[in-house]
Structure formats: C-alpha cells, structure tokens
C-alpha cells in the first residue's frame, strides 16, 4: 500500500510540479522513516539498515532497513559487536558485488543506540576509499535526529508522500526560511515545523536541509505546546540550537522554529540567542494566520 501511495504521489508531482501536496497515510516506526529519508539523498547505495536491541529484549535485530526483506532478522556477531562497542567494521561480499560498512550509532546525547549498516555496490578490485566517508556522512545525518533509543520505536505517521522528501515547496513558509538564511549567515540550519494542511500532525514545512514532512520530535512538540523556548548545546557536533515557538501576529502558536548555529565552547551564546529572536520576530510580523504559511509563491 505504501508503494502505491508513493507512486500516486509521484504522478501528482509530474502533473503539478509547481504545487506541493501534503497527505496522511499509515504509520511506521521513526527508525524506518530515518533510513528511508536518508536513502533519498544517497541513491547510489544498495541499502541503509539499523541494528538495534529493542527496549525490554536481549536480541539485536534489524529494526529498520531500506531492504524490506531484512527487517526483523537477527544481527550477526559483527553487527552486535559494533552496536555495543562502537567503532568501524567493513566486509566485502564479492559474490554479490557488495561492500558493507558498519559504524556505531549514537543518539543526540552521545549514548549508543546500535549499529548503522551502509551497503554499497562494489566490483571486486575497484576502489573502496570513499565508502567509509560516505557511511560516516549518513551517520552524521542520523545522529542529531535520534533523541533516544526509545524514540527509534515511536510510531510516526506517513505524512507528505512526495516523490522526493527534499523537493523544496513553493510556499510562503519556505520563502521565510530562504530569506532568513540569506540575511543571517551565522545560521547553518533553519527548520520550521507546523501543522500540515489537512492533518493534525506537526511536521517540517520549511527548511534549508530538506526533510519536508518529517514529524516533529518530542522536544519540538514540547516547545509548541508550552511556548517555552528550548536551547541545546552540543559540543560534540559544535552546534548550538535555539528553538522558540513560531507565532502569528495575534500571538497564536503556529509551530516551532529551530535555529542552529555553528558553536565552539566559549562563543557568545547571548549573541546567537538574539539572532534567533530576531528571526522569530521578523517571521511573526509577516504571519497574519496559519494559512499564510502555505500560500503559494513564485520562485
């Protein structure tokens, strides 16, 4: 059924390339969404898989994979070792012309949650030097999105089934993001989460890193429900994130605004916070209501 929905959405994208449709479908676990979203950005890969021991169990299994036939299979000794100890392992399978890289996978706080398997097409005798760096890029993209081990198993709706989750929508909310990124070079990531039209689910509706339709996490939802700004310092990734609520001119909460800066210990946090607050104020001044977010614009 999911493949049918994606096929239909792909046809719609071909027919209405200037529009951006949001829709609601069945759910999946967050881990599966992670690997599927990331695979879009690496079409040269064979597969991406996560080897994890689910909470309350003792067996490490493939909990998510872009190869559906492998989901649920028991992990082998190398998978289990990397999931526990971290580090790096690589294995070539000449008969299948594949090369797999295994890396330890951590959550945002640096706690180990399992192992990441990235499988490449490979011809025996051909270079392998680029495989590990690409696998590490996949890991670097996944880690900031993982709040915890338990969060990998959260059920999330299949929202926005466009052919490409990184297809930039021609909407006013995306225009707000593009303008802010151009005006404030200190910002490295800017993401707006709001209710997708026709749903009751908060998802990414504007971004400079794609991932449109990805559901809001627990921290994002807390900001939206309480209106209290969240701040997080990550010295491992050298980032500082400020996430205030996004409001309209009447003070109604529309969603959240995640502003991420490059950061080193000792940098002036107050200056970064002021930039995030300026972006928030400038956006609020342009939003009479939530419908404005999705108003079509000409690129």
Image (cartoon, grey):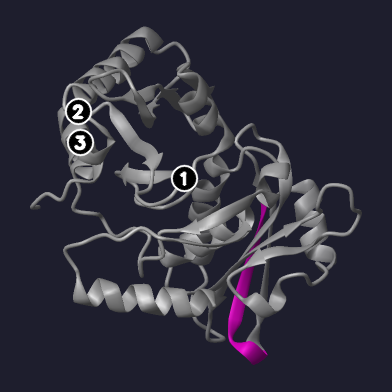
Q: Position of residue 253 (x, y in %)?
A: 37, 25
Alpha carbons under labels 3 and 2: distance apart: 14 Å
Helix or strand or loop: what does disc 2 sit on? Answer: loop
Q: Position of residue 31 (x, y in %)?
A: 63, 55
Q: Are marks 3 and 1 in contact (CB under 8 Å)?
A: no
**Residue range highlighted in magenta:** 95-104
Q: Residue at x 20, y 76 (%)?
A: 15
Alpha carbons under labels 2 and 1: distance apart: 20 Å
Say above or below: 133 vs 235: below
Q: Residue at x 35, y 37 (%)?
A: 192
Residue 211 showing in the rendered view: no
Residue 156 colored in magenta in the image: no
Q: Residue furthest right?
A: 58
Please tell me in which quadrant of the rendered image residue 264 appears.
Answer: top left
Helix or strand or loop: what does disc 1 sit on? Answer: loop
Of residue 194 and residue 46, the one placed in the foreground of this image is 194
Of residue 113 and residue 262, the one placed in the foreground of this image is 113
Q: Residue at x 46, y 50 (%)?
A: 214
Left or right of 3? Residue 68 is right
Residue 65 showing in the rendered view: yes
Residue designated by label 2: 288
Q: Which mark is residue 200?
A: 1
């Amino acid at each position: 059924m999911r493949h049918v929905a994606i096929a239909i959405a792909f046809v719609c994208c071909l027919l209405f390339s200037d529009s951006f449709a949001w829709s609601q479908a069945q759910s999946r676990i967050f881990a599966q969404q992670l690997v599927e979203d990331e695979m879009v950005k690496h079409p040269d890969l064979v597969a991406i898989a996560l080897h994890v021991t689910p909470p309350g169990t003792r067996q490490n299994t493939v909990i998510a994979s872009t190869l559906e036939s492998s989901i649920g299979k028991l992990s082998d000794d190398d998978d289990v070792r990397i999931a526990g100890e971290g580090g790096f392992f690589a294995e070539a399978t000449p008969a299948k012309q594949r090369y797999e890289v295994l890396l330890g996978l951590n959550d945002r706080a640096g706690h180990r949650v399992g192992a990441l398997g990235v499988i490449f097409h490979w011809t025996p005798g051909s270079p392998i030097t680029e495989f590990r760096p690409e696998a590490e890029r996949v890991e670097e993209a996944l880690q900031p999105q993982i709040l915890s081990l338990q969060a990998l198993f959260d059920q999330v709706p299949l929202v926005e089934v466009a052919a490409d989750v990184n297809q930039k929508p021609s909407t006013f909310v995306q225009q707000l993001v593009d303008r802010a990124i151009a005006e404030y070079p200190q910002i490295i990531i800017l993401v707006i989460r709001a209710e997708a039209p026709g749903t009751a689910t908060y998802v990414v509706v504007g971004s400079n890193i794609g991932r449109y339709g990805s559901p809001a996490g627990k921290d994002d939802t807390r900001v939206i429900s309480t209106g209290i700004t969240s701040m997080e310092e990550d010295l491992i990734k050298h980032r500082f994130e400020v996430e205030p609520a996004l409001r309209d001119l009447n003070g109604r909460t529309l969603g959240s605004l995640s502003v991420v800066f490059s950061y080193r210990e000792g940098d002036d946090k107050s200056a970064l916070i002021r930039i995030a607050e300026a972006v928030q104020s400038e956006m609020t001044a342009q939003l009479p209501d939530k419908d404005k977010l999705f108003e079509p614009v000409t690129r």
